[in-house]
Structure formats: structure tokens, C-alpha cells
């Protein structure tokens, strides 16, 4: 059996779309690589942030749904997005978050790595992690970013989750995707002290990690602004995707049929605590319908929505990348 390669993308729920753009392009220096609509709710945006080329494994995507109530942290919903930055870059990032008025926690150590936790403007639990991506991972720095190339976010490093029943989630992630327990430690933060376990793929570097803490005493989490909606794992092609979906079904999940997202193909399933997973193909990628130099500049619609472009555009709030770059 082969394993998923690592994270493909993470999708979260945001508030106001321009505020989301201001933060991810203006403050964090990521590139808007696709400006499109939610294919299940085409009257709302779906914004994709990544590196210069929108490589799989660095895409952080958002549904801006400002009318939703705030999310509730708890078990059964992915909890924290970890973004990889080069070793030694966190001092730069502490200064940058301070300069942009972003509240953050003190730098802490997790599994031997320096980590800077913060929340985005809409409450998404996030952290910058000094770590190296896995062998074969592709990252293209974005020369037009307001963050110098040597400090840019280079990957989705990992994802954190609270669960009630560790073995159910761990067994599923092992059988469906190939995760194995790598290490465990008790971690102290300014607010709490918790036991964490790190499950990994491959060599366990950035992009290949789930960190899990057993918290039966807390409530179930819920979606809302600031929540992670789902986490997608990389399949090289559709044959691999079918293999992983079959493994997930053998492990007790109920995978959806393959859904064509146009830039990749998707299969979705819940793990036993309820958190939503996706298996996404690496291709064809974001350059299939836009010039690489112009990614994200205009609203791109999957072909099935093109007939409704005027009505869709009229219903979406205007957003501006150049405004975000002035933040
Ligand atoms: Zn997705």
C-alpha cells in the first residue's frame, strides 16, 4: 500500500473577504493564486493563497462567510493550521506580526522546533513553525511578496486536532493514509499544559504531520468563522486517489464519489471523530485556466458557472490585491 504524500491544501472559514486578503497577502506575504467561487455556494468567494506557482502543499484556502457565528474550538474539528517558515525566520515574523498589530503568543518549543502561535483576524488558530519540508516538496518563492524570500512561508507544515478517542482517529489515519506515531511530549504554553502526540508520514518533516491531543473533557467543536473546514491530502494521480479512497472505506469511512474541482479532483470523508478530510490530486493545477504570471488577478469560474458570470460577479463584494499589498 502506498501512502498520501503530505498535505495538499487546508480550507478554512473566514469573515470579510477583503480583510482575509489583507491578512494573507498583505501581512503574511502569500500570493492569491486563485480567485473563484465556492462551487457548492457560488454566491460566495473561494480564495486560494499559496506560493508563486500555487504548488500543492502550500495552498491555504478560505470561504469568506462573514454572516456565520464564530467557531467553537473543541474535539472533532481540525484546530490549528501550522505554516512552515525557514529556520531562523521567527525573529523576523515576531517583529512583522507586532508591526501589523497581530496579537500572538510567545515563541514556544514543540517537538524541538520553534513555533509562533497566533490567530488570524477571524479567529483561525494558526502557528508559524521553523521547519524544513520533506524530500521532493516543491516551493517557489514569490518575488512580488512584501516578505523577503528567505523568510517566506514555504509550506503547510502540519495540522492540530483535539479528539475524544485517540485510537479511533489514529487507526483510521494509519489505515487510510499511512500515518504512524512518531513522538509524544507534554507541552507548556502561557495558558495550559497538554499532552501532544505527533503522527507522521514519510520522514515526518513539514507537510507530513498531524499533532493530536486527547481532550474528552471539552465540548465538541463547531464550524463558524475561524474554523478549519477540511484538510486535503496529496494523491499523485487519480489511480492513487482511488486507492486511498478504497483504504479509507476499508477503515470504516464513507468516501464521496470523485468530484471534479477543475484544478484538482477531490474525494471527501470524515475521520471517526468527525473532522473532514479530502484526498486531492496534484494536477492539473492552477495554471490550467490562467497565465502563471496573472494567477489570482481576475475572478475565474469553472466552465459550468461561466453562463452565470454576470449574476455571480454582481453578487460578490469587490476585493483588491493591490489594496492588500499596501497593508
Ligand atoms: Zn478542499
Image (spheres, rainbow, N blue to C red):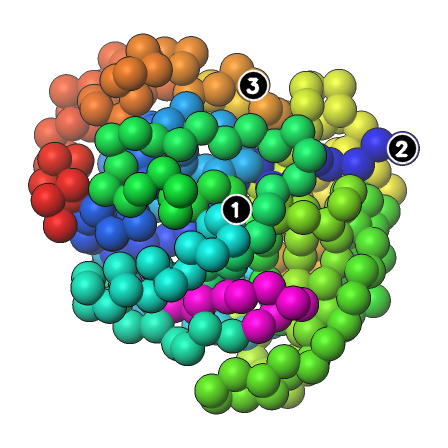
Q: Position of residue 29 (x, y in %)?
A: 29, 44
Residue 279 position (above or below residue 196): above
Q: Which of marks 2 and 1 is in front?
A: 1
Residue at the right extreme of this rendering = 1
Residue 63 position (above or below residue 217): above
- Residue segment shown in magenta: 109-120
Q: Which residue is drawn at 49% across and 49% down?
A: 86
Quadrant holding the N terminus: top right
Helix, strand, or loop for circle 1? strand
Pointer 3 residue Cβ closer than 8 Å to ligand 1: no
Q: Residue 269 carries which label?
A: none
Q: Which of marks 1 and 3 is in front?
A: 1
Q: Is residue 91 left or right of residue 79?
A: left
Residue 99 position (above or below residue 31): below
**Which residue, given by chain and number where applicable, does mark 3 sit on?**
283
**Which residue, given by chain and number where applicable, does mark 2 sit on?**
1
Amino acid at each position: 500500500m502506498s501512502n498520501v504524500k503530505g498535505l495538499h491544501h487546508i480550507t478554512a472559514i473566514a469573515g470579510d473577504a477583503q480583510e482575509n486578503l489583507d491578512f494573507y497577502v498583505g501581512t503574511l506575504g502569500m500570493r492569491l493564486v486563485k480567485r473563484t467561487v465556492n462551487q457548492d455556494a457560488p454566491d460566495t468567494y473561494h480564495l486560494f493563497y499559496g506560493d508563486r506557482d500555487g504548488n500543492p502543499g502550500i495552498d491555504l484556502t478560505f470561504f469568506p462567510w462573514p454572516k456565520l457565528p464564530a467557531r467553537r474550538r473543541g474535539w472533532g474539528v481540525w484546530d490549528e493550521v501550522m505554516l512552515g517558515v525557514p529556520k531562523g525566520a521567527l525573529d523576523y515574523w515576531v517583529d512583522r506580526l507586532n508591526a501589523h498589530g497581530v496579537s500572538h503568543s510567545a515563541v514556544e518549543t514543540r517537538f524541538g522546533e520553534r513555533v509562533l502561535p497566533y490567530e488570524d483576524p477571524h479567529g483561525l488558530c494558526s502557528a508559524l513553525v521553523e521547519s524544513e519540508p520533506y524530500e521532493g516538496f516543491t516551493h517557489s518563492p514569490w518575488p512580488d511578496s512584501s516578505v523577503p524570500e528567505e523568510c517566506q512561508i514555504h509550506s503547510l507544515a502540519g495540522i492540530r486536532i483535539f479528539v475524544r478517542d485517540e485510537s479511533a482517529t489514529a487507526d483510521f489515519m494509519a489505515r487510510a493514509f499511512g500515518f504512524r506515531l512518531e513522538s509524544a511530549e507534554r507541552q507548556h504554553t502561557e495558558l495550559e499544559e497538554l499532552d501532544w502526540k505527533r503522527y507522521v508520514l514519510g520522514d515526518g518533516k513539514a507537510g507530513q504531520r498531524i499533532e493530536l491531543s486527547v481532550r474528552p473533557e471539552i465540548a465538541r467543536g463547531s464550524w463558524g468563522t475561524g474554523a478549519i473546514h477540511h484538510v486535503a491530502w496529496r494523491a499523485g494521480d487519480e489511480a492513487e486517489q482511488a486507492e486511498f479512497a478504497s483504504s479509507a472505506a476499508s477503515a470504516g469511512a464513507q468516501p464521496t464519489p470523485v468530484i471534479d474541482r477543475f484544478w484538482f479532483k477531490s474525494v471527501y470523508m470524515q475521520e471517526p471523530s468527525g473532522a473532514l478530510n479530502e484526498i486531492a490530486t496534484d494536477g492539473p493545477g492552477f495554471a490550467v485556466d490562467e497565465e502563471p504570471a496573472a494567477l489570482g488577478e481576475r475572478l475565474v469560474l469553472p466552465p459550468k458557472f461561466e453562463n452565470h458570470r454576470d449574476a455571480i460577479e454582481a453578487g460578490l463584494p469587490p476585493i483588491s490585491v493591490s489594496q492588500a499589498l499596501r497593508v
